[in-house]
Amino acid sequence: MSTRAKIHDTLERLERWLREHQPAFLAAMRPGATDAELDDLERAIGRQLPDDVRAFYRWRGGIAKADHLGPDGWYEGPDGPFWGRPMTLSEIRSEYEECCGYWERDWQNLARGSESAPKPGWWHPAWVPIFDVNFGPQLLCVDTAGVWTGVLGQVIYFDNKSDPRTIDAASLGDLLRAFTRSLERKRTFEDTTDPGTLLDDARSTSPVGYPQYRNATEEPTIPEVQQNAPVVTTRPAPGAFRVGDTVRLLEGAFHESEGKIKRLEAGSWRVTVTLIFWGRPLDIEAEYWQIQLVEKTEQEPSVGEWNELTEGTELFAHLGFGPSIRKLRLFVTACYRIIYLRDWPEAAEPLCNALEEMANGHQNFTALHDALDDLWQSIRINSDHRPIVLKDLLASCPPPLGHGEPLEAHAPRERGATDLIREIFPNPFAPPRFAPAWRTADVVALARGIYDDRAFERMPILADALQEAGCDNADILTHCRGANDVHVRGCWVLDLCLGLE
């Protein structure tokens, strides 16, 4: 679904909810603005509004504060589901000019701060206020320049009396989608007795990976787009680098410096290189395209070392860039099956299924987002405490897992990362030999049934079928018959039988 289609779908769902649950709030909103009116606003403030913001205001024109003032001058309009009052176009212009004017007039005082702490990020002229939060000095703004992150259209929470600057979503459309899903599902915690908590829970729902926290004391830099940066579309060659290889850095402060590879991070294709700087070792992280091979390591790991290692970090280091995107995703999915299915089966099963579907090339991001939200609500984890790896799994490839935590950090501790790694990835020091003749109709049918049904108790039967087909590879047969082995989708023997990478 395109970005434009997504925001229109969200607004249609939001309108249905408002008509059913809060018709007074919907009635108080002004009719949608015309394109000409939105163009006038953009010319007046000198900023181009993102498409989703324009779509929101074409849907409804906000609620005018002046239309709902009580005798004492306080706002007495209908309490709606949003984080605050959606402002009208004229109010947006007035508030924007006021904030920019105050910033320009009192720059020196703001830069000094009340406690001698400079606050260069108190305000930025790229921020366009669209929601009046709590009917006070707080504003929800759309960022037309991508301050701090480079993400144009991100939503920033601004409070003129405090320093935190929270980035609540990558776009207004993303924020509205997460918010609307929460309203539709009427999410409340089990001990909720106050119906109003429904709205509070919905308002606190953030898209995956948000909120992100910045501060007014930070310089409001706008990251430059690197026009000449390489576009990484595939993983490097599996044998391109190994731990211990000597490489040369091609970019950065240590350009032309040489060091040895300490770590290869599967999934993000990042490399940790150890340099000797002023007589001391210094670890530098780089992308694989930022290094050049100087000399291959002479140290050859033994075949048995793969089975002897007890740390997931070491195993992944030896895998290097060999694993496919599919294998990496299935490893993470297997970890989450073990971690969450035991305690939250109803919420975790849809998520794990959606992750496996994505690993196998069927990308349904809507189902993945919904399943992820269901799981976090079930285990009551706030959006800012959610594991980074699942946010990265939602991102477009490549890389499949972003630059988050190492993969082995997400393996279940009670089972250990090493069992799952050896289940999904074969020994790189002794790659298994699999003859095409062993892939008979019986072997393929058995392997497909085990994979589709997760009937891993049939693995010994698969070993018998392989043996009948002529398989004499002890590693393959032992893996199938191992009584204590853990089996999951992505099992390297099943993948060999089915011809999967």
Image (cartoon, helix red, strand yellow):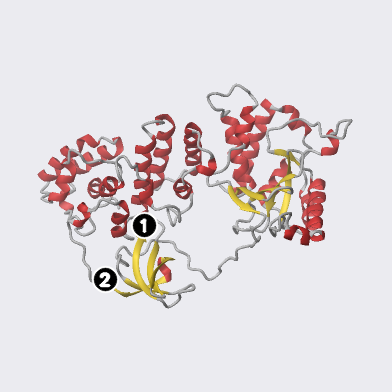
**Is residue 28 placed above or below 440 in the rendered structure?**
above
**Is residue 95 placed above or below 13 in the rendered structure?**
below
Q: CA distance from mark 2 to mark 1?
A: 19 Å
Q: Secondary structure at mark 2?
A: loop
Q: Who's the residue at 64% across and 36% down the image?
A: 12
**Mark 1 residue type:** Ala
**Mark 2 residue type:** Thr
Where residue 403 sits, quadrant-wise, is bottom left
Q: Position of residue 480 (x, y in %)?
A: 18, 42
Q: Which residue is mark 1?
A: 266
Q: Nearer the viewer, mark 2 or mark 1?
A: 2
Q: Who's the residue at 47% across and 43% down the image?
A: 364
**101 lies left or right of 273:** right
Instruction: For label 2, count other residues whose C-alpha is less than 10 Å away and answer few (under 14), some (14-19) or many (20+).
Output: some
**Is residue 403 placed above or below 224 in the rendered structure?**
above
**456 lies left or right of 106:** left
Can residue 360 be seen in the rendering of this structure? no
**Which of 58 and 260 lies nearest the eye of the viewer?**
260
- The label shown at residue 297 is 2
Where residue 182 sits, quadrant-wise, is top right
Q: Secondary structure at mark 1?
A: loop
Residue closest to the far bottom = 256
**444 lies left or right of 375:** left
